[in-house]
Image (tube, grey):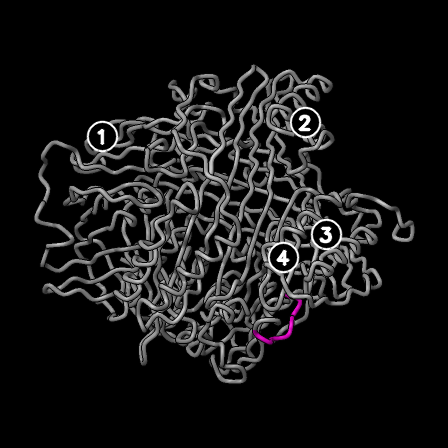
Amino acid sequence: MNSREITTQISKAADFLNLKKWDYGASFSNDYSVQVDKGEAKQLKASQKQILTIRVWNQSNLVGITTTSDISESGIKKALKQANIASDFGNKNESTEFSPLAKDPIKVKEVKKRNPVGIKKLLTVLREAEVKLLESHESIKSVPYNGLSESFFERVYANSEGAFRSYSKSQAALYLYARAEEKNKKPRSSGSVKLGYGADDIDIESCIKEASNKTISHLNYSSIKTDKYLICFSPESFLTIINAFSSMFNARSIIDGVSLSNKNSIGEKLSTEALNIYDDGLHEKNISSTPFDGEGTPTKRLCLINRGRIENFIHSESTARIFKTTPTGHAGLGSKVSVSPDWIVVEKSEEKFDLKTSLDHSTYEGEFVYIEELNAIHAGVRASQGSFSLPFDGWLYKNGNKISIESATVAGDIKYLLKNIVNIESSQELTTSGISPHIWVDELSITGDA
Amino acid sequence: MLSSQIKSNEIIFGSCNKDLLEEIIFYGIELGADFIEIFIENTDNSSVLAEEDFITSVSPSFGRGAGIRIFKGKKDGFVSTNDLTKHGLMRSVSQAIEMLDITDNKREVFNGLNKYRDYSLSKKKWINEVPSIHEISEKLLVSTKSLKKNNKILTRKGSYSRNLQEVIIASSDGTYVSDIRLHQTVGLNVIASDAQYRSSGSRRFGSSGMPNEFRLWDHEKAANDVFESSMNMLYADYVDAGQMPVVLANKFGGVIFHEACGHLLETTQIERGTTPFENKLNEKIAHESVTAIDEGISEGSFGSLSVDDEGMEPEKSVLIKNGILKKFISDRAGELRTGHKRTGSGRRQNYSFAAASRMRNTYIAKGEHTKEDLINSISEGLYCKSMGGGSVGATGQFNFAVEEGYLIKNGKLTSPVKGATLIGEAKEVMPKISMCGNDLELAPGFCGSISGSVNVTVGQPHIKVDSITVGGR
């Protein structure tokens, strides 16, 4: 069944079951991926997946939901029946409705449709990439984590009031994580990830070069003394921190009491006036963008922090209604609708503020710690408390030299971090999770072995 | 039902699928596969969430799908699909064959599926024995109410999930089994708040194959435990960073062994060349007080299974005995590529993942000391009563958050501390586990890795690590 036929099928089955109000989200995907090990194909993978999530409203306007991979006529009927049963337990304390924007026009990025290049081509490309990476430096002994994949999928949202949205896209990803070993030293590892709309769009050479350079740059390492340091966050690591604490801008988290913000936090000063943060799912560089969310609300650019102050929260239909505003296109589709950011863009305000502009990661000669990548986010972040303690890959810059830090964690508090931003570099960099410049923060605790 | 030999062009659960499965396997062998495995599942899941005094989410789901894996030499092709018709399964076989680019004329022999092993016979009634959504909701609401012990409790949550998975596994070595797996888990958590202070507390409980277990769950005890933990930590100071001895509590304290050492004993790590223990079999890798086990047979434990996802019954694997490395955790691909015999540890989240060597119930065996012996032996250190999550980097460094910690001074527990993180490397820390308590207990958890998220238990008695880096402020 295609998406129109599924909509018709659901409509018929709902009529039969006397269910007047329903909506659904579905996704259909074909994925292909390869992994290699020293020139040999290791695992080649293909999958066809279909997932359907149906919500129904009962006569008391309570919502029930069911998710299934069985998109047959009988599967759809069963899903509707189960959702109807589940609606008896619907949340009486907080109602859910259709998004008022579910029929608004959506902006779909003009992207040329890519066709699958096929497993054989993926394998050839990855084999060559592995060889080049291994040959790039004598210390690189293996590429234990590698993969090249391409996905083709369609997302659909429709409801009983006639809303219907469908969106097809493709995406490819390459990751290469190298492992370097030198005598009497600990193994070191680093890597790179690149995305593209299709496998042919991925900048393979730059992925190899980045993985190689990053890995080699950590070969000479030293432990770091436990102390407080001036920190320079790479664009990737700063975006990691912002995403980890995005509950500060999340209306769902605020209602649930697990956010550092509250309903009255709009306008609260969090950081230097030089800092602007947007959520911009439709950004031209965002390969993973989708034009509507799980409730059918159009995706849009939204300012979260304007001149250091909270400007907006991200919303679903129900949180927007509670906050007396409109949905922002950040909802999932679930029994309890989740809310999450799309793609964060960090900018330096055009106006000049009191920043220490001499702090530039490429020229500054004083002592500082450069955090290249933060790890173990799921374990080291307490979003509801605002604290973090995270291992990282990075370097200690001292007296004009840099040396890789052997093993260390950076710990602190997100509000302290934002308040202590001392410089925002001018140039932004594109990462897989958003765009940001390098960000400098004073006095964060680093724990090392020394 | 097997003897009924119904001819069908589609996999039908609860019916005989032998002819169809044999036909598909034969088709793959004829096309040049060295080995072909078919994993088919049918799932019936539900989850319920209670927040404060309301049920805020009830989420049932069901689905079906197949994963087909074909080996040619040491490489393998894996295709997953929701299409369980003969046409769909054969198309998946063709796709896997095509991916592997099989060109030689060598053909293996397939002698048909052996005598059927049905592990599901006594389990078919489980679906009718598990608690209803109504019953679950009632108990969760009572539980969250129990958490409301003072006005410092800001949020209260109780969650339950039940996964019922029916599987059929057939492969060209004659394996033909079916099984039904039931996993139930229930968790409570709170956030406490007072002025600028915040803390949280959480506990999770889980079982496999015990439909009545949720009814027996002592929610009052669990609520007291979670509440006390959050109150103890509410005004705690941040821990000072440094090297120090630590005592790790039993139950979920075992997550460190699981993450930092257990994963390095999976054959997938040997395949990648990312374990420091690859050539250390029968060598000392840990303190002689350490014996570590991985098994899938403890009745009711969250990581237990009657048969693994490759059709092998799980064994009890002594990984480390008195500090000596004795065994790796292996699956079919691991045996093929590393030579380590399978241990009944081929596991996957669902049909869309190829099985991989994964832990089941993994724990450090009990020793002879009391918890007090361990604490009394430390003049200044840290007691980690409750561990949060953690991770292990590509080169073996691990990092774990301490959810509930207390300073040890002169052999006594003193003030609570927050923000502690344990940092180290397995090969350096394992020799420093110098004392093991006599109070082994297991705790359920979910482990995410190459073949998805699987149910496991971690465990240990109280253990003492002589020195470890504690991250703090």
Q: Is residue B16 toward the left or the right of residue A116 in the image?
A: right
Q: Amino acid at mark 4?
A: Phe
Q: Residues within 10 Å of mark 2 (few under 14, many from 20)?
A: many
Per the model, the C-alpha gap separating discs 4 and 3 is 18 Å
The correct choice, above or below, for B367 with respect to B180 in the image is below
Q: Earlier in the sequence, mark 4 or mark 3?
A: 3
Residue A113 falls left or right of residue B90: left
Q: Is residue B339 magenta?
A: yes
Q: Where is mark 1, residue-wise? A: A306
Name the secondary structure under disc 2: helix
| Residue placed furthest toward the right | B4
Are labels 1 and 2 on one chain?
A: yes
Q: Which residue is mark 3?
A: B167
In the image, which residues are magenta? B338-345
Label 1 is found on which chain of the structure?
A: A
Per the model, the C-alpha gap separating discs 1 and 4 is 48 Å
Q: Can residue A46 be seen at all in this image of the molecule? A: yes
Q: Which residue is mark 2?
A: A80
Picture coordinates of residue A55 (x, y %)?
Answer: 60, 26
Q: Nearer the viewer, residue A203 or B356?
A: A203
Question: Looking at the rendering, in which quadrant would you find the C terminus of chain B?
Answer: bottom left
User: Do badges 4 and 3 share one subunit?
Assistant: yes
> On screen, A121 above or below A190?
above
* Mark 1 or 4, closer to the camera: 1
Gap between marks 3 and 1 measured at Cα: 53 Å
Any part of residue B445 in sight = no
